[in-house]
């Protein structure tokens, strides 16, 4: 799951990013409303943390423009102000939840979890299955029969996306933004490198599942006859 943090207090933004990463999310940080909105509009985020007072474009405007563009990503508004009028304005603009600064890390994580739970299609079970493979979320392992192999974080994210989207072809671009983030320096060949890591692991597991390359398009999982 990928979270966008739009917060101009850089230390707070960094702390939020660390908290989210420790809880297993990927976090991208933006420090003003304009770049925050641009990122949010990519539609790659599962939750957005949005500060109210921001340079270039304030939080309420960002939220309003995001909703006007048809983007329904759950938004958690962060604000130092606790006046009722701000909360009402935020909720009117389409905020899903409010958190008043300062807040407890646990409180924040509980809100993020609640917001991701509200979207059933985003809820990821503890393990995913495809063919003879089981991807275990709690241990970051890929299991096939009696064999298992541990995955790195990026390998895990990639395998998860491949399984969740097993009925379609995933483009390199999709994998790149979903795993490395929108503003990352990662390039297409990062995707190729991790695909090759995963293929080696599938071989090691003696799985009947293969990652098929669709030339000029991307990748998909397929089951081969054993
Ligand atoms: Ca602020």
Image (cartoon, rainbow, N blue to C red):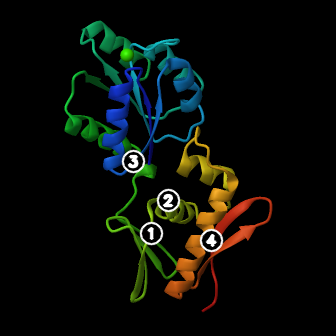
Residue closer to the observer: 73 or 11: 11
Mark-to-mark CA distance, 3 and 1: 16 Å
Would you identify the image quadrant in which residue 68 lies? Answer: top right
- Mark number for residue 154? 2
| Residue plotted at (63% across, 59% down) | 191
Q: Which residue does the image show at 28% across and 15% down from the upper left?
A: 80
Evaluate whether residue 197 shows in this view: yes
Q: Is residue 106 left or right of residue 62?
A: left
On residue 87, the disc is none
Disc 4 crowd, CA 10 A, few/some/many (<14, 14-19, 20+)? some
* Ligand 1 falls in quadrant: top left
Of the image marks 3 and 1, the number of the one nearer the N terminus: 3
User: Can you tell which of label 3 and label 1 is closer to the viewer?
Assistant: 1
Residue neighbourhood size for the residue with mark 1, other residues' Cα within 10 Å, grouped as few (<14), some (14–19), many (≥20): many
Question: Is residue 13 left or right of 105 when viewed as pictured?
Answer: right
Q: Is residue 144 above or below residue 160?
A: below
Query: Where in the figure is residue 135, as x and y percent of width and height?
Result: 43, 71
Query: What residue is pinned by disc 1?
Result: 151
Q: Secondary structure at mark 4?
A: helix
**Mark 3: few/some/many CA within 10 Å (<14, 14-19, 20+):** some
Comparing 180 with 71, the one in front is 180
Res 25 label? 3
Circle 4 is placed at which residue position? 196
Please report the residue visible at 80 percent of the width from the left and 60 percent of the height from the top: 216
Question: Which numbered disc, 3 or 4, marks the residue closer to the eye?
Answer: 4
Q: Earlier in the sequence, mark 4 or mark 1?
A: 1
- Asked if marks 2 and 4 touch (Cβ < 8 Å), the reply is no
Upstream in sequence: badge 3 or badge 4: 3
């Amino acid at each position: 799951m990928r979270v966008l943090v739009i917060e101009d207090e850089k230390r707070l933004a960094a702390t939020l990013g660390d908290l989210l990463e420790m809880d297993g999310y990927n976090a991208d940080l933006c420090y003003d409303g304009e770049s925050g909105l641009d990122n949010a509009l990519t539609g790659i985020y599962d939750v957005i943390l949005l500060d109210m007072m921001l340079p270039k474009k304030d939080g309420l405007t960002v939220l309003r423009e995001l909703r006007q563009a048809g983007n329904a990503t759950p938004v958690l508004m962060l604000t130092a102000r606790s006046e009722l009028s701000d909360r009402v304005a935020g909720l009117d603009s389409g905020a899903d939840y409010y958190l008043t600064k300062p807040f407890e890390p646990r409180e924040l994580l509980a809100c993020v979890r609640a917001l991701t739970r509200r979207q059933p299609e985003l809820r990821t079970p503890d393990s995913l299955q495809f063919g003879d493979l089981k991807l275990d979320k709690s241990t970051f392992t890929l299991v096939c029969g009696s064999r298992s192999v541990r995955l790195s974080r990026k390998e895990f994210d990639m395998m998860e996306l491949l399984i969740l989207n097993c009925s379609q072809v995933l483009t390199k671009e999709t994998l790149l933004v979903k795993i490395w983030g929108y503003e990352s320096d990662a390039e297409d060949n990062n995707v190729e490198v991790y695909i090759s890591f995963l293929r080696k692991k599938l071989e090691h597991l003696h799985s009947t599942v293969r990652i098929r390359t669709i030339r000029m398009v991307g990748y998909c999982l397929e089951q081969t006859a054993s």
